Structures are given as C-alpha cells and as structure tokens.
Amino acid sequence: MRGGTPSFESRLCPPDELPARRAALPGPVVFTNGCFDILHRGHVTCLAQARALGASLIVALNTDASVRRQGKGEDRPVNALEDRAAVIAALESVSLVTWFDADTPLDLIVACAPDVLVKGGDWPVEHIVGAHEVLARGGRVESIAFEHERSTTALLRRIRSL
C-alpha cells in the first residue's frame, strides 16, 4: 500500500452488514468477542488459536459504552472503538471485525450463525453467551486455555505504578 487506505480497513464490518459479509466467508466460521483494549500477547495468541479452529474468524468488539458498563474502570477503554477495531482488523488471523453496544454479543451471534463460538479460558463453556444457540444449530463452543497469562487490567496497574 502506498498512501490511501490500508487493506485491513476492508475487514471492518458494521453490525448491520454482518450477516451478508459472513455469508461470503469460507467456512467453518469462528466467532469470538471482547474489549481488546490494549492488545497483548495473550490476546493475539488466543485469536490465532481461535482462527485455527476454522477458515475464517469474526471478532466482535464491545463499544466504548459497553466496555464502561463492564466495570473495568472509569478510564476504560483506554483506546476508542475505532482504534481497537483497526488494530484487530490488521491481525492476519482476523477475517472481519464488528462491534456491539449491548452488554453481550448475543444478537450478533444469532445474526451471523457461526460454526464455532470461542472465548478465552477464563470462560467455562456453560457460561459463554450464545453457546446454547450455537450448539442448538449443530455448531461447536470452545474455551481456549490461556497459553500466556496476561491481563490489560494488570498491565495498566503496572504502568500506573511506575
């Protein structure tokens, strides 16, 4: 790319376009979600492992308001949605990036009907939002064990103590 818009920007997908854009992806399609506020090794490892479970990976990000409602702190997210989305879209493991303003991504999961639903190892399968719906359609739900114990909250705590 010389000047102009980076190619990864084409991976950004407004929620209302998700069903149509998902239909064009090679399957199996994997779906995961999160804040992904300050990207770290744990995030990128989990996303790469999620992608390995299928041919395409959709990542849904909490909007800024949704992140604030999670109680992660008054100053979170550190990075605005458009910045978080661009960084995630630039990862080779990611096929599409969308977002949701609700407290959970359930509506997006239902709308895009992924073949595989994934969350990090801190989520038992029975507590993963959308698991029932994906399993009822014959899909799979996976909780990927953490290979690298990292936390944005812990990272911010360390930065603030310097």
Image (spheres, grey):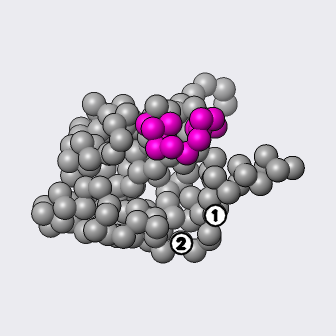
Task: Say whether residue 68 is magenta.
Answer: yes
Q: Residue at 59% of width from left, 41% of height from top?
A: 73
The answer to whether one can see residue 112 in this image is: no
Residue pictured at 73% horizontal, 52% vertical: 157
* Residue 150: mark: 1
Range of residues picked out in magenta: 66-78
Residue 47 picture location, percent across and down: 49, 60
Q: Mark 2 points at which residue?
A: 146
* Rendered location of residue 138, percent (x, y): 15, 67
Magenta residues, dominant SS class: loop
User: Which residue type does callout 1 highlight?
Assistant: Arg
Does the stretch in magenta take in 85?
no
Please determine whether, in this image, residue 31 is positioned above or below residue 124.
Answer: above
Residue at mark 2 to residue at mark 1: CA–CA distance: 9 Å
Rendered location of residue 153, percent (x, y): 63, 52
Q: Which of 117 and 78 is in front in this view?
A: 78
The percent coordinates of residue 135 (x first, y second) are: 18, 65
Q: Which of 96 and 122 is in front in this view?
A: 122
Q: Can you tell which quarter of the image residue 131 is in?
A: bottom left
